[in-house]
Image (cartoon, rainbow, N blue to C red):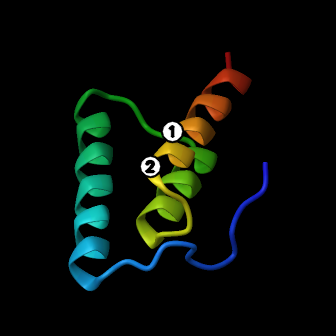
Amino acid sequence: MATATQPVLTLSPPEAAERRRAVQSALGSLHIEGMEPDREELEIVDRFARGEIDLATMKAQMDADIETHL
């Protein structure tokens, strides 16, 4: 799976903050439910938060990662 090494989306400071908030909220929800994402999943959501990938790409990469662990 190829990954970007720099942001491919130009995020404004409010957009970047909103992505970080959304990622932290989702991770918090998982933690509350007793689930912990693995290293690869954290790397994917971090790339999304930094603007290196868009939402559709994040979803596709997460689906692929989950599929490899079934």
Q: Residue at x 60, y 50 (%)?
A: 39
Q: Secondary structure at mark 1?
A: helix
Quadrant in the picture for residue 26:
top left
* Image quarter of residue 66: top right
With 66 as the anchor, is 25 left or right in this view?
left
Q: From what the image shows, is residue 58 above or below residue 17?
A: above
Kind of residue at badge 2: Leu
Residue 46 place in picture, x, y as percent: 49, 62
Look at mark 2 in the image and give the residue it sits on.
Answer: 55
For label 2, the crowd category at 10 Å Cα-Cα, with few meaning under 14, some 14 to 19 and many 20 or more, is few
Q: In which quarter of the view is residue 24 placed?
A: bottom left
Query: How much space separates mark 2 and mark 1, taking CA atoms?
Result: 6 Å
Quadrant of the rendering where the C terminus is positioned: top right
Compared with residue 49, is residue 66 higher up or lower down, i.e. above or below?
Answer: above
Q: Which residue is mark 1?
A: 59
The residue drawn where x is 27% and y is 84% is 13
Q: Are marks 2 and 1 in contact (CB under 8 Å)?
A: yes
The amino acid pointed to by label 1 is: Lys
Q: Crowdedness of circle 1 by 10 Å Cα count: few (<14), some, many (20+)? A: some
Residue 8: percent from the left, percent from the top? 57, 73
Residue at position x 32%, y 46% from top?
27
Local secondary structure at mark 2: helix
Q: Is residue 22 left or right of residue 6?
A: left
